[in-house]
Image (cartoon, grey):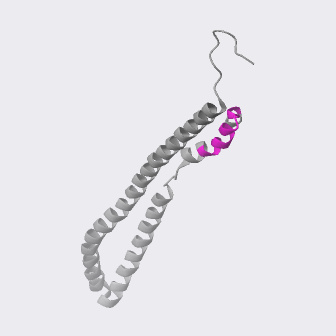
């Protein structure tokens, strides 16, 4: 069967398959780029939490070291026992360590993963079958 005069030629199956392959390749490259961007953002959030751990450790070490020594001596004078005053100071340090660990854990749990990539990858099968409307 011949095509009407002036009508553009219909694309061949090979041309259509090539177009689908190019579109799929473009889609995959875009998904990889999105995953990289989200991974970078999540890594920055994780680094922020890690730096808070480090900052808390350094500040806590220096400040509490000197305060602990002062408290140890003050309690030792009041209790007439440097040994028991050292135990009291050690218990206070344990409480501080538990609070800092809980805060660091909360910051680490805020790392969100790759929500946009997960969402868009779930939509690929419908797009491949020509049912983009099911992705809404």
Residue stretch rendered in magenta on the structure: 121-133
Residue extending furthest toward the front? 1
- The location of residue 22, given as percent across then percent down, is 55, 37
State which quarter of the image contains the C terminus. top right
**Residue situated in front as seen by the camera: 1 or 11:** 1
- In the shown orientation, is residue 19 left or right of residue 91? right
**Residue situated in front as seen by the camera: 108 or 67:** 108
Residue 12 visible to an observer of this rendering: yes
Residue located 47% across and 44% down the image: 33
**Chief secondary structure of the magenta span?**
helix
Residue located 66% across and 37% down the image: 127
| Number of numbered discs overlaid on the protein picture | 0
Magenta span contains residue 126 = yes
User: On screen, 79 above or below 61?
Assistant: below
- The location of residue 111, given as percent across then percent down, is 49, 55
Residue located 63% across and 34% down the image: 14
Quarter of the view holding residue 11: top right
- In the shown orientation, is residue 19 left or right of residue 51? right
**Residue situated in front as seen by the camera: 13 or 40:** 13
Residue 80 visible to an observer of this rendering: no
State which quarter of the image contains the N terminus. top right
Magenta span contains residue 108 = no
Quarter of the view holding residue 57: bottom left
- The location of residue 83, given as percent across then percent down, is 32, 90
Residue located 64% across and 45% down the image: 122
- In the shown orientation, is residue 16 left or right of residue 101? right
User: On screen, 45 above or below 3?
Assistant: below
């Amino acid at each position: 069967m011949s095509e009407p005069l002036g009508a553009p030629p219909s694309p061949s199956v090979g041309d259509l398959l090539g177009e689908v392959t190019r579109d799929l390749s473009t889609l995959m490259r875009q998904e990889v780029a999105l995953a990289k961007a989200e991974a970078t953002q999540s890594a920055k959030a994780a680094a922020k939490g890690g730096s808070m751990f480090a900052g808390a450790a350094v500040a806590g070490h220096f400040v509490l070291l000197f305060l602990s020594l002062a408290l140890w001596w003050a309690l030792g004078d009041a209790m007439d026992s440097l040994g028991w005053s050292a135990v009291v100071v050690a218990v206070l340090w344990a409480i501080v360590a538990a609070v800092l660990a809980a805060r660091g854990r909360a910051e680490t749990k805020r790392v969100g993963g790759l929500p946009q990539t997960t969402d868009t990858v779930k939509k690929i099968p419908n797009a491949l079958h020509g049912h983009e409307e099911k992705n809404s």
